[in-house]
Image: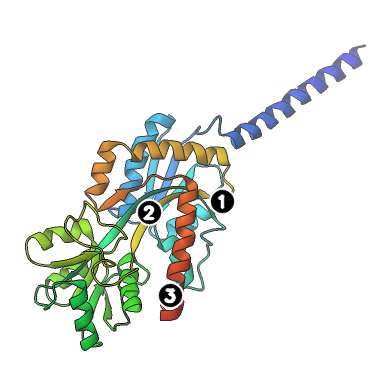
Amino acid sequence: MQRMIATGFSIGILMLAASAVLGQAGSAGSGLFFPIKTIRIVTAESGSGNDIMARLIATGIAGSMGQAVIVDNRGMTAIEITAKSPPDGYTLLSFGPPLWIMPLMRGDTSWNPVRDFAPITLAMSTFSILAVHPSLPVKSVSELLALARAKPGELNYAGTFPGSSAHLAGELFKFMAGVNIVYVPYKGPASALAALMGGETHVTFANSAATMPPVKSGRLRALAITSALSSALAPGLPTVAAAGLPGYESASPLGLFAPARTPDAIIARLNQEMVKVLNAADVKDRLSGSGAEVIASAPEELAATIKADMTRLGRLIREAGIRAD
């Protein structure tokens, strides 16, 4: 009898343990007990658009999710860190086009943008302003194109590193218009803009928030914006497409990602909380001040945007022979 009781007791303990394990696994998949520890958002350099967005989201979701959310600036290595992290929702990535465009320009990237990441939300998008030095005798996109065609190779544009939004905006402009404007790379957006204001270069494609002040003071002349639609962030400026180059569009979408295979329920919870933060009036005001337009989408819209971007810019990169090795 004692042996039977002991055996039954042992079986009961084993059943309870098995039930607990199964319950924990089910909870992780369902997201019922997420989060239970600090969440980390890994992003690019401090002060970048990604960084600003990540910090606003981190502050916003920390309260509603009941856990600390930290931002970890790691530059380009942020991508690899996230790709190699456990798919549990505790390491997230805030990043833009280099995530999905860099693999098209390099043969040695360790990540695949579709295979290694689960989209959470297309948070916001930024566009560039096509601006010229006031000494350049052009006042419209059509006049710039006419001058570039009349003087092939004599005009140049200030850009940043290969594959950046400023670089690809300029290369797409050249490619679609069939003009030869020389790309001059600078260390960062501020350096590129300073070079244009100093007369070292003729043209640039630069962030709207940084470009509008020198435009208003007369140090630069703005011709158009690179987005598909006109924007309240650059009132009175036409799109490049409407002003002389039909079909042109260049924007820089910024999104939040988790490692691939993160449970759908966790992705849904993160999306819900992040969209709520992004749609708050004060957050929209802060991001518009940095030249961004809030989108706050479902995960599927970010996935579709990446696919369309890779298709459209992939052709440019192949045919123009753009490399970032």
Give the labeled residue for mark 3: 317
In the picture, residue 226 is in which quadrant?
Answer: bottom left
Number of numbered discs visible in the structure rendering: 3
- In the image, residue 96 lies at what x, y percent? 39, 57
Which amino acid type corresponds to the residue marked 3 in the rendered image? Ile
As drawn, 5 above or below 42: above
- Count residues near mark 3 (Cα–Cα under 10 Å), then give few for <14, some for 14-19, many for 20+: many
Residues under labels 3 and 1: Cα distance? 26 Å
Give the labeled residue for mark 1: 260
As drawn, 88 above or below 36: below
Which amino acid type corresponds to the residue marked 1 in the rendered image? Ala
Asked whether residue 204 is in view, the answer is yes
Q: Earlier in the sequence, mark 2 or mark 3?
A: 2
Residue lying furthest right in this view? 1
Asked whether residue 102 is in view, the answer is no
In the picture, residue 32 is in which quadrant?
Answer: top right
Per the image, label 1 sits on a secondary structure element best described as loop
Which amino acid type corresponds to the residue marked 2 in the rendered image? Leu
Per the image, label 2 sits on a secondary structure element best described as strand
- In the image, residue 29 lies at what x, y percent? 61, 37
Which of 96/19 is in front?
A: 96
- In the image, residue 51 lies at what x, y percent? 33, 50
Task: Tell me the number on the disc at residue 254.
Answer: 2
Which of 297/71 is in front?
A: 297
Residues under labels 1 and 2: Cα distance? 18 Å
Q: For the C terminus, which image quadrant?
A: bottom left
